[in-house]
Image: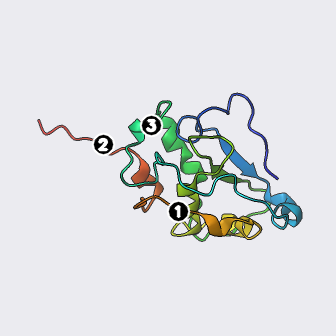
Amino acid sequence: MARDLDESQKGHGCFNCASALEVIDLNHSDRSLMTSWKLKRTAQCAHCPWRVEVDPHDIPHGYCESKHQALAATIAAPGALPVAGVALHVMVCHETDEAHCIGWLNHQLGPGNNLALRLRMMSCENRDKLRLRGEQHPSFEATLPRVSVDPA
């Protein structure tokens, strides 16, 4: 079951509010994994930091690098089996706190090999409607801003 975000967590989504995570309780797997549901958003937004051509500093409504780094908690160990009692943390879109980040979903369902998310997505009615925009970063670390080195 997903928990609602409290008022302190609402706002401008994933890269502005690191605590804005949907938490799915896998303890209730008989209901939460089998009950059909739909993604509220299926198209990747124009400013998604998973897009190679997006500079996270240009994300609307501000940017905080430490909050961005804290979102590493949403990245599963590739191929790790779901553990009963351990919540699945989901990155939300920075444009709305009511939708999953499509770039994150793409990564975790593909190269990120997030098995818990794959199980959850089996009951998603519109999972085949996901649409990306352009080239995607290969890892969460690649979404972080590049550190500029002063040549002097």
Relative side of 82 to 104, left or right: right
Disc 2 secondary structure class? loop
Mark with earlier residue (2, 1): 1
Q: Nearer the viewer, residue 143 or 40?
A: 40
- Tell me the kind of residue under disc 3: Glu
Is the residue marked by circle 1 packed among few (<14), some (14-19), or many (20+) residues within 10 Å? some
Q: Mark 1 highlights which residue?
A: 107
Disc 3 secondary structure class? helix
- Tell me the kind of residue under disc 2: Val
Residue at image x 78%, y 40%?
A: 4
Q: Position of residue 49 (x, y in %)?
A: 46, 48
Is the residue marked by circle 3 packed among few (<14), some (14-19), or many (20+) residues within 10 Å? some
Which quadrant is the C terminus positioned in?
top left
Q: Is residue 116 above or below residue 56?
A: below
Q: Position of residue 12 (x, y in %)?
A: 58, 35
Q: Mark 2 highlights which residue?
A: 147
Q: Position of residue 65 (x, y in %)?
A: 45, 37
Mark with earlier residue (3, 1): 3
Q: Nearer the viewer, residue 84 or 33?
A: 33
- Tell me the kind of residue under disc 1: His
Quarter of image, res 35: bottom right
Residue positioned most to the left: 152
Quarter of image, res 123: bottom right
- What is the C-alpha distance between the residues marked 3 and 1? 20 Å
Q: Nearer the viewer, residue 41 or 68?
A: 41
Q: Is residue 54 above or below residue 139?
A: above
Tell me whether circle 2 and circle 3 mark residues in contact (CB < 8 Å).
no
Relative side of 72 to 24, left or right: left
- What is the C-alpha distance between the residues marked 2 and 3? 11 Å
Q: Which mark is residue 65?
A: 3
Q: Is residue 78 above or below residue 14?
A: below
